[in-house]
């Protein structure tokens, strides 16, 4: 594919974009085989969404109750706060388990990306694959001009173009296929290394 496109005017750029797109499709297919089609993943995702809706309903009920009624006792307020804490804890636990479940496919996807990156590096080593319409800031230029001879700051390396394509294509592909992680999981902060809960201290 890369050789077929190399004869075109923007052949190198198109080759990197096409390989990046094909890699994104392959990575999502691997993720679907190992993660997205499993009952564990679907169960955790449903749990996260259920707890998120329940927590939102409790928060809206708490705010409307506080605004509309001054006769609410301290004990009922404390009871509701404890229930919210339990739901929040369950949401964080489910989000953490979801992150752990995705580790298996993450390792395989990382290996695929590493192999593809090595292949592209050998194909386009020392070549500018695109021209940037601007001179990037020095920090970005270290990546955009990496491994390219000459001093033209608008020359774009394969590494920079592949990085941009990988981020944009795979993220949009996940949204298109419905594989994007639940927003509630990110909001819960229940990753592998969550922030400490200030309420515990």
Image (cartoon, grey):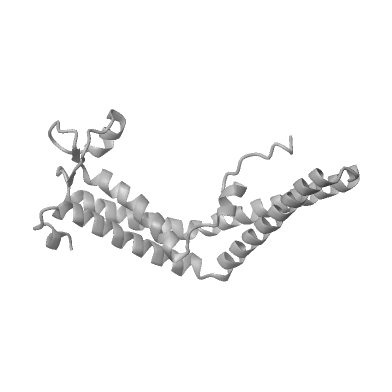
In which quadrant of the rendered image does the C terminus lie?
A: top right
Q: Quadrant of the N terminus?
A: bottom left
| Side (left or right) of 26 relative to 91 | left
182 on left or right of 135: right
Q: Does any portion of residue 135 appear in the rendered image?
A: yes
Q: Position of residue 24 (x, y in %)?
A: 35, 59
Question: Is 127 rendered above or below residue 22?
Answer: above
Residue 145 in picture, x, y percent from top left: 21, 37
Name which residue lies at 61% across and 40% down. 195
In-image side of 201 versus 143 (left or right): right
Residue 135: which quarter of the image? top left
Quadrant of residue 4 in the image?
bottom left
Most extreme residue toward the top is 138
Is 74 or 103 nearer to us in this picture? Answer: 74
The image shows residue 181, relative to residue 146, as above or below, that is below
Residue 190 appears in the figure = no
Foreground: 18 or 175?
175
Residue at x 72%, y 53% (from the top left corner): 87
Asked if residue 18 is positioned above or below residue 191 in the image, the reply reads below
Where residue 176 appears, as percent x and y from the top left, is 42, 63
Pick the residue in front: 147 or 185: 185
């Amino acid at each position: 594919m890369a050789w077929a496109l190399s004869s075109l005017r923007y052949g190198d750029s198109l080759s990197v974009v096409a390989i990046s797109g094909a890699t994104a499709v392959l990575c999502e297919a691997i993720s679907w085989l190992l993660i997205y089609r499993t009952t564990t993943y679907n169960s955790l995702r449903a749990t996260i969404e259920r707890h998120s809706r329940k927590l939102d309903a409790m928060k809206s009920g708490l705010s409307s109750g506080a605004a509309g009624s001054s006769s609410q006792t301290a004990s009922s307020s404390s009871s509701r706060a404890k229930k919210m804490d339990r739901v929040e804890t369950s949401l964080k636990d489910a989000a953490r388990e979801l992150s752990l479940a995705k580790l298996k496919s993450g390792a395989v996807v990382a290996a695929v990306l590493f192999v593809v990156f090595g292949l592209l590096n050998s194909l386009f080593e020392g070549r500018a694959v695109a021209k940037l319409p601007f001179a990037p800031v020095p920090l970005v230029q270290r990546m955009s001009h990496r491994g390219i001879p000459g001093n033209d700051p608008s020359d774009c390396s394969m590494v920079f173009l592949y990085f941009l394509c990988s981020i944009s294509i795979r993220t949009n592909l996940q949204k298109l296929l419905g594989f994007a992680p639940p927003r509630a999981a990110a909001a819960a902060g229940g990753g592998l290394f969550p922030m400490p809960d200030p309420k515990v201290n």
